[in-house]
Image (spheres, rainbow, N blue to C red):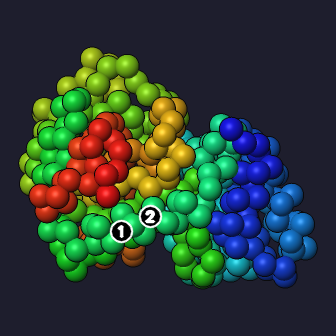
Amino acid sequence: MGSLEEGAKNAVLVCMGLKPGEHVLIVTDNAQLKIGQALENVSKRITGYVKLFVIEDLAQRPLKVLPKQIVDAIPWANVTFWAAQSLPGELPSRRTFMEQAKRYARHGHMPNITMQLMEQGMCSDYNEVYALTHQVYDAVKGANSIEVTNPFGVNLRVEFDRNWRWVPSDGRYHDKGRWGNLPEGEVFTAPKKVNGTLGTNLLGDWFSEKYGNFKDLLSFEIRDSMINVGSINCANKVLRNELTQYLSTDSNSSRASEFALPTNPLLMSLPTIGNLLQDEKARVHIAFGDPYRDETGAPWESKTHVDMLLDECNVKVDGKTIMENGKYII
């Protein structure tokens, strides 16, 4: 599809808009060191101020607390990247990094990034991503409700609070405080209320790394935005138990916290690959836990955030169909 070099150039130059003289901070790990180094090499062609940290050189995994060396370097940076595997229990550390990065810099978030994602999603035409993102944003930003169905058990009614913001994740993060999950292309918000049934075969956070696209569909009911944990059904009992435990982390872990529509034309034309970081830019998805309060304005918090992919969706915005079988008709 593309190359690591091309993907790194898109990330550094197109998405983050790096300028000569700016400072770049890259956090990576042993598993994705080649990707971290590719971001480093492209950055060094633009500026002489680049720092790369390998997590395992500073702390044991899973990472419980962000290492002091990384914390101290954040205020120095204009552009930051997190390009590393996601392990169970590491979400608070990643969140700490991202929250601090947004205070001083613009941030490219790449948890569970792989060579395949660099060669596919990061090699997208980001002018096309930008155009579709804002077309979809214009179609949904004033919505009262959205209905989603698909052949795999999804039948959802999602209601919205107009005081909470829709976010166009268009792949251009050129101003301090802006950030995105790279590869990019989605429009999201926090839902006010969700009711219905859901079926998925791909989860976010560390589930994506461990399970990928799992064979046996996971399904459950949602009542007043909360997952009915007793209704969770999945033939993989280990997965079911791990998800049930995850959803009990805090009082909001099982609360619907994000509703998102995909806006990466290239990825929407390809099969999913079992990596949520890329696949969420290709399919409708919903998440439970933290609602990205700073971005959406939703008034709660959670220690967890797990996305769930919804394939081949039909989507109606206030009764008007904008997507059929996973393809936009707007």
Residue at 67%, 49% in the rendered image: 123
Q: Mark 1 points at which residue?
A: 137
**Quarter of the rendering containing residue 317:** bottom left
Nearer to the camera, 184 or 59: 184
In the image, residue 94 lies at what x, y percent? 54, 58
Disc 2/disc 1 C-alpha distance (Å): 6 Å
Q: Is 120 rendered above or below residue 322?
A: above
Counting other residues with Cα less than 10 Å from the Cα at mark 2, is it few (<14), some (14-19), or many (20 or more)?
many
Q: Name the residue under label 2.
A: 133
Q: Which secondary structure, mark 2?
A: helix
In the image, residue 151 lies at what x, y percent? 22, 30
Residue at 60%, 81% in the rendered image: 175
In the image, residue 180 lies at what x, y percent? 53, 64
Q: In this view, does 307 lie to the left or right of 250?
A: right
The N terminus - image quarter: top right
Residue at 35%, 30% in the rendered image: 201
The C terminus - image quarter: bottom left
Nearer to the camera, 80 or 312: 312
